[in-house]
């Protein structure tokens, strides 16, 4: 039987869970992220506590955690860029190998997209390394397509993808 998957926004006291998921993702899929495992391990533990506390209530940046039977098994970040464009991004997406292909990644992206859309923003962006064919296919299957923006980071070419989401329905007037 498939395990049940749920997603919840990070809570203010989940710094340790956030650090555990972030380091697990960098250890397991170092090719997928700009940051390195060493960066994360060297970071002060309290910085993860501070991020969790901020992400629990901020309107600018947040994280969502995937659970399988109550155990943390995946992560996604969502944030608005600090520029006049204020584009919204999903980032740091990772699902533990044991629970892949069960739509946990889709649930994370859709939950993060709903949080972004609830703030009135209809385009969701994601940078994906060109060599990460799995992530490319995953995002394409969810309706993301190329923006035409392409950049070279320290060690990889990355493509900017975008998905247009429908507006969040307003409740009917009383
Ligand atoms: C990308 C990732 C989050 C997908 O998570 P997931 O929970 O398996 O995703 P879902 O079950 O919602 O969707 C899986 C779909 O994505 C695509 N996909 C996932 N893995 C794939 C693979 N190895 N090859 C081709 N397509 C793949 C397929 O369309 C697949 O559908 P299927 O299971 O019916 O074949 C996961 O593979 C992962 O954590 N990878 C390592 C980290 C990473 O690359 N993150 C993205 C950074 S941009």
Image (cartoon, rainbow, N blue to C red):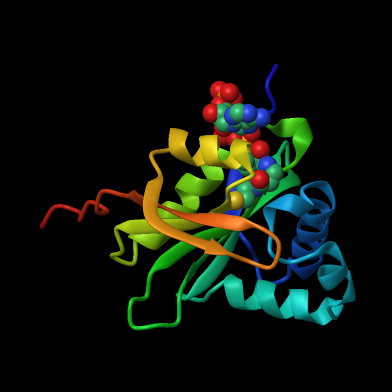
Q: Quadrant of the N terminus?
A: top right
Q: Nearer the viewer, residue 42 or 76?
A: 42
On screen, residue 149 above or below 99 = below
Q: Position of residue 138 (x, y in %)?
A: 53, 36
The image quadrant of residue 12 is: bottom right
Q: Nearer the viewer, residue 99 or 147?
A: 147
Ligand 1, image quadrant it occupies: top right
What residue is drawn where x is 76% and y is 35%? 97
On screen, residue 133 above or below 164 = above
Q: Position of residue 161 (x, y in %)?
A: 43, 52
Is residue 5 at least partly visible in the picture? no
Report the label total: 0
Q: Nearer the viewer, residue 95 or 171?
A: 95
For residue 61, side relative to residue 121 (left or right): right
What residue is drawn where x is 10% and y is 57%? 173
What residue is drawn where x is 68% and y is 22%? 2
Q: Nearer the viewer, residue 125 or 44?
A: 125
Q: Position of residue 145 (x, y in %)?
A: 38, 45
The image quadrant of residue 73 is: top right
Name the outermost residue toward the left.
Answer: 173
Q: Quadrant of the C terminus?
A: bottom left
What residue is drawn where x is 33% and y is 58%? 123
Is residue 38 at least partly visible in the picture? yes
On screen, residue 135 above or below 159 = above
């Amino acid at each position: 039987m498939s395990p049940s998957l749920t997603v919840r926004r990070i809570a203010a006291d989940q710094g340790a869970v956030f650090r555990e998921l972030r380091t697990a993702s960098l250890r397991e899929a170092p090719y997928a992220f700009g940051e390195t495992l060493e960066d994360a391990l060297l970071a002060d533990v309290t910085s993860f506590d501070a991020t969790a506390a901020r992400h629990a209530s901020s309107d600018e940046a947040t994280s969502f955690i995937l659970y399988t039977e109550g155990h943390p098994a995946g992560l996604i970040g969502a944030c608005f860029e600090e520029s006049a464009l204020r584009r919204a991004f999903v980032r740091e997406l990772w699902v533990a190998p044991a629970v892949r292909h069960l739509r946990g990644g889709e649930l994370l992206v859709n939950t993060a997209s709903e949080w972004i859309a609830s703030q009135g923003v209809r385009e969701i962006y994601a940078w994906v390394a060109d060599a990460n064919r799995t992530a490319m296919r995953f995002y394409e299957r969810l309706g993301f397509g190329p923006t035409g923006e392409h950049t070279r980071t320290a060690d990889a070419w990355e493509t900017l993808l975008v998905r247009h989401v429908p507006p969040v329905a307003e409740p009917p007037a009383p």
